């Protein structure tokens, strides 16, 4: 409504334009959101290793909630009580997104999103050599490493410190995106179809 008022066009016209532009951007996603392979993947591993000495990391994974206006389905209400879409992302050390899943209701657990992703299938089929770092919202798997809940010795404590320091890249990514695009933090107005 504000954009329409500022430039003197009806809000339905602004809505159509926003839809067209968003669709055009989404159509280009495969040109920009791709998982690295071969030599590029080795560079990603080296970059992650340089952060805190964690070997074989090909990406950091996490989910974030993007607020939406109240839809008709309660399934979009997340555990914090507001309506959202739960978006899963994987990034590298330069905060480049290499995998993105943005279609699950806010009540969906991170693990379910991961298990239903193409990335999970590729890792399970060993198409990608290395592992992701995730928080305890994910299962601990050979290709998805999570923190040790109750570290019992110095080695486990060092593992957790290295894990946390390295995995911080995904937290930074979400922070950068939500500051750059405030609608991701404050909420998006659109209809779910």
Image (cartoon, grey):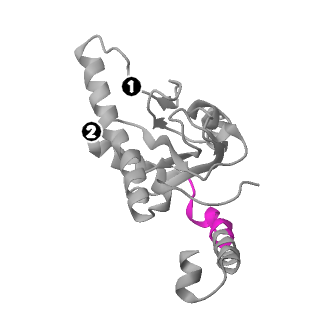
Query: Is residue 93 on the magenta stretch?
Result: no
Residue located beneath label 1 in the image: 147
Q: Residue 113 placed where, x, y %?
A: 63, 37
> Regarding mark 2 in the picture, which secondary structure is present there?
helix
Looking at the rendered image, the quarter that the C terminus falls into is: bottom right
Vertical arrangement, residue 65 with respect to residue 144, above or below: below
Left or right: 191 as drawn, with respect to 144: right
Query: Is residue 26 on the magenta stretch?
Result: yes
Q: Residue at x 32, y 42 (%)?
A: 49
> Regarding mark 1 in the picture, which secondary structure is present there?
loop
Q: Residue at x 49, y 61 (%)?
A: 183
Bin the neighbour count of mark 1 within 10 Å (Cα to Cα): few under 14, some 14-19, many 20 and up: many
Mark 1–mark 2 Cα distance, whole angstroms, equals 14 Å
Q: Residue at x 27, y 39 (%)?
A: 52
Left or right: 36 as drawn, with respect to 166: right
Q: Name the residue nearer the viewer: 169 or 42.
A: 169
Q: Check whether the beta carbons of the residues at disc 1 and disc 2 lie within 8 A of each other.
A: no
Residue numbers of the magenta segment:
23-36
Residue located beneath label 2 in the image: 52
Judged from this view, the residue extending furthest toward the bottom is: 8
Judged from this view, the residue extending furthest toward the top is: 152
């Amino acid at each position: 409504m504000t954009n329409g008022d500022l430039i003197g066009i009806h809000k339905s016209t602004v809505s159509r334009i926003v839809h067209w532009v968003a669709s055009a951007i989404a159509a280009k996603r495969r040109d920009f959101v791709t998982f690295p392979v071969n030599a590029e993947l080795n560079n990603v591993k080296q970059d992650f290793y340089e952060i805190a000495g964690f070997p074989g990391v090909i990406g950091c994974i996490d989910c974030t909630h993007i607020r939406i206006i109240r839809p008709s389905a309660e399934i979009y209400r997340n555990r914090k009580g507001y309506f959202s879409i739960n978006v899963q992302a994987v990034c590298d050390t330069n905060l480049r997104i290499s995998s993105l899943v943005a279609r699950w209701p806010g009540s969906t657990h991170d693990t379910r999103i991961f298990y239903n992703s193409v990335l999970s299938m590729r890792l399970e089929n060993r198409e990608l050599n290395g592992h992701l770092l995730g928080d305890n919202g994910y299962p601990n798997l050979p290709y998805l490493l999570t923190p040790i809940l109750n570290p019992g010795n110095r080695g486990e404590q060092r593992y957790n410190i290295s894990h946390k320091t390295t995995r911080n890249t995904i937290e930074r990514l979400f922070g950068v995106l939500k500051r750059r695009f405030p609608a991701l933090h404050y909420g998006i107005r659109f209809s779910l179809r």
